[in-house]
Amino acid sequence: MSVKYKLVLKKDLTKGAAADAKRYYASAPVSGTMGFDSICDVVADRSTASDGDVALVIRGVIRAMGEAFLRNEVVQLGNLGNFRISIGSSGTVDEKDFQANLIRKPKIIFTPGAKLRAMIEKISLERIGKEPEKSNPGGGDDDRPVIE
């Protein structure tokens, strides 16, 4: 399985880099979206459940996850992985100075399970787009064969 990537010129994020410095970074461009209905169709095609049954179960899982998050529970979905709520806040020197409005919006953190981690380990990378040109500042040897 091959994941395609391209190079994108962005601000240099290395420590001590000049303010206007830039570097090339790898980026995996999105090629499309697999929607909810398509997922239900694929699962239904590979099982005895109908696409409506699959949709019903997924919606039930989402509802159950929401209820578990409100109880501060980690949701474990087997080989898929774990989901949990995470919050952060600005800090205060004294406990009495802390107010709830210092808490940032909660986030859902996903930790992939063993099967997903194994899939990622099998992925190879394939570059797409333009290859960078070789620089030849001096105009001398440039790895081309010399014909005499």
Image: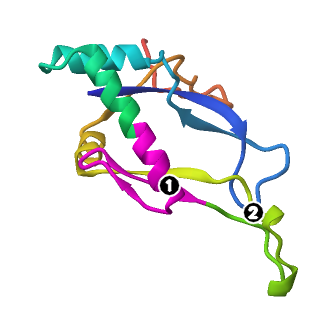
Q: Across the whole image, how many numbered discs are drawn on residues?
A: 2
Q: Is residue 40 left or right of residue 30?
A: left
Q: Give the magenta-colored segment's residue range.
A: 62-86
In this rendering, does residue 7 appear at all?
yes
Looking at the image, which is closer to me, 37 or 61? 61
Q: Position of residue 136 (x, y in %)?
A: 62, 28
Quadrant, the C terminus: top left
Question: Which is more N-terminal, label 2 or label 1?
Answer: 1
Looking at the image, which is closer to me, 65 or 112? 65
Residue under the image location 70 percent in, 52 percent down = 105
Quadrant, the N terminus: top left
Query: Which colour style is shown?
Result: rainbow
- Where residue 69 is drawn, which disc sits there? 1
Q: Where is residue 147 in the image (x, y as percent from the top left)?
A: 42, 12
Which amino acid type is marked by label 1? Answer: Phe
Neighbour tally class for label 2: few under 14, some 14-19, many 20 plus, Cα within 10 Å = few
From the image, tell me which residue sits under label 2.
103
Which amino acid type is marked by label 2? Answer: Ile
Q: Determine whether the residue tagged by mark 2 lies in a helix, strand or loop.
A: loop
Q: Residue furthest left?
A: 48
Q: Determine whether the residue tagged by mark 1 lies in a helix, strand or loop.
A: helix
- The image quarter containing residue 101 is bottom right
- The image quarter containing residue 75 is bottom left
How far apart, in angstroms, are the residues tagged by discs 1 and 2? 17 Å
Residue under the image location 57 percent in, 60 percent down = 86
Residue under the image location 50 percent in, 63 percent down = 72
Residue under the image location 42 percent in, 20 percent down = 36
Q: In this view, does 25 lie to the left or right of 31?
A: right
Q: Where is residue 71 in the image (x, y as percent from the top left)?
A: 49, 61
Instruction: Decide whether residue 72 is among the magenta residues.
Output: yes
